[in-house]
Image (tube, rainbow, N blue to C red):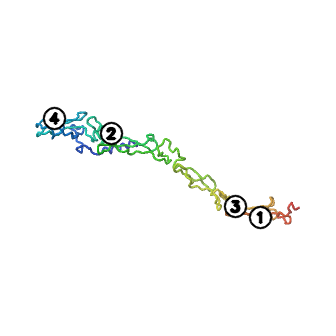
Amino acid sequence: MRALLLASVFAFLACGPASNGSDGGTPAAPDGSAPAYRDGGTPDAASEGGTGTPCHDGDTEPCSGTHAGTCDPGTRACANGTWGPCDGRLQPQPGLCDWPNCADGGFNDGCQCFTNPFPGAPMSDYLRECHTQDAGTLGHGPCTSGYQICEPTETGSAWSDCLGEVVPQADDCSDLDLDCGANPAASCACTSGQTRPCGGAAGGSCQPGTQTCANGAWGRSCSGAVQPVKGDCAAPSCLSTAGHPVPNPGCECVSGSTRPCYTGPAGTEGQGTCQAGTMTCNDSGQWGPCVGETHPYPTCDMPSCTGTPLSACQ
């Protein structure tokens, strides 16, 4: 990704702003090797024409200035008794940031960098990598360094803000590791988007659901679950099977259901006229009284439904 960013920026710089030289362009040097800028000089007898002592037509003299590096003060000629401009003059030019200083090949005064690449210029002089955050975040999650380009200013040039950089963000407990930490999602109970089965009960028509992790915590809902409903006594639980209704939690029975009952002494049901009754489940999910049963009377002055006297009455 970093190589792609730098390549695209290099292409942009190749079409960058024009020179900020005094003539508005980049005049070619006499030998074609470098632009031959005129620095304007200091208007005195030793550097520029039109001032200073009179001269004889045809006279020439060198202009003042430095000869360091590729710099050349230039030469002026006398015409009509006046010194002309310094021809071939090449001197350091403050604020000129699209070509190196002729004295030492570095930046002219006021320039932090080169505003345009030129043959032989190192990339780091007009395009450089940058990272404004802790260097330890690089290589973790999506964090990457950015780049700076050289931009012209009123007095020369300066580096731009750090462009294209991806910095740490608040971790959403996803597997993207947005905070670019060495231990992604270390404080998260789960990874955002992760799922797990929930519900628990199985059998009959019951089925588990799905719980989803959001912001590093398991959600409270159990999506898609079919489970027994606590306190619903009007309908059987999903655990019920054909012919075997099962009440929901909190209910003793399913409202409206019935079952046989007999409260007489053991062994007397079905003897003589002794018979079982019926219990009905009420709306609260509780069994009602045993209705319609016949069992031996507990006194000796009543005949027993078994057809024989109670043993206590013999």
Q: Taking 188 as reference, is 130 left or right?
A: left
Residues at badges 1 and 3 in contact (C-beta under 8 Å)?
A: no
- Identify the residue at the far right of this view: 314
Gap in Å between the C-alphas at discs 4 and 1? 142 Å
Per the image, the residue denoted by label 4 is 61
Q: Taking 42 as reference, is 279 left or right?
A: right
**The C terminus: image quadrant:** bottom right
Q: Position of residue 38 (x, y in %)?
A: 22, 40
Mark toward the viewer: 2 or 3: 2
Q: Which mark is residue 286?
A: 3
Numbered disc 3: secondary structure: loop
Per the image, the residue denoted by label 2 is 125
Gap in Å between the C-alphas at discs 2 and 4? 37 Å
Q: Quadrant of residue 46?
A: top left
Please state which amino acid type lies under the numbered disc 2: Asp
Q: Which mark is residue 293?
A: 1
